Image (cartoon, rainbow, N blue to C red):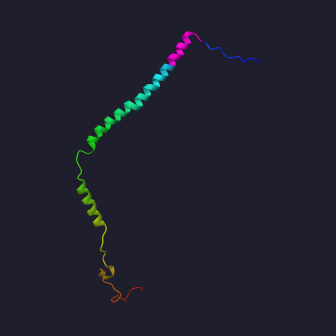
Amino acid sequence: MKLKLAKIATSSKTITLIVTLIFIIILGYFGGFLYKNIYQTITQSQEIIVMRAEVSPYAINIEKFNDILTAIDKKSTATNTPAWQEMRNPFGFTSINRPTTGGID
């Protein structure tokens, strides 16, 4: 049994066409690589430079900022809590002078 293979036309026009198509495909991939890895990187770095100037035109005083944070922490964490048992009842009812008439016990 003989295996029959299809004949491939190997004329010079066909070979030139195939080589040209391969070259165009390689050129397209190379152009895409350059666009993605070089051109977009340069564009993004230029945008970062422009945005850096817009974001914070004022210098921040870090020492004042830290002082404010410590003052807020001191204010929010009370060290001496009041003795609630020694506080006077604002409603005036204590167990000693509790009214006994007309109420439900």
Residue 105: percent from left, percent from top: 42, 86
Q: Height in image: 56 above or below 43?
A: below
Q: What is the span of residues highlighted in magenta in the rendered image?
A: 10-21
Q: Residue furthest right?
A: 1
Which of the image's four quarters has the N terminus? top right
Residue at (49% x, 19% y) in the render: 23
- Residue found 37% across the figure and 30% down from its top: 39
Name the spot of residue 51 as percent of width and height, x first: 29, 40
Magenta stretch contains residue 15: yes
* Camera-side residue of 87 and 27: 27
Say how many tags the image has.
0
Q: Is residue 30 above or below residue 85?
A: above
Residue at figure coordinates x 23%, y 53% from the top left: 61
Q: Is residue 83 left or right of residue 22?
A: left
Question: Going 26% across and 41% down the picture, which residue do you hit?
Answer: 53
* Of 33 and 77, the residue lying toward us: 33
Q: Is residue 50 above or below residue 88?
A: above
- Res. 65 image quadrant: bottom left
Residue 87 x/y as whole percent: 30, 81
Q: Is residue 18 left or right of residue 78?
A: right
Residue furthest top as drawn: 12
The answer to which quarter of the image holds residue 10 is top right
Picture quadrant of residue 43: top left
Q: Main secondary structure of the magenta part?
A: helix
Q: Is residue 18 magenta?
A: yes
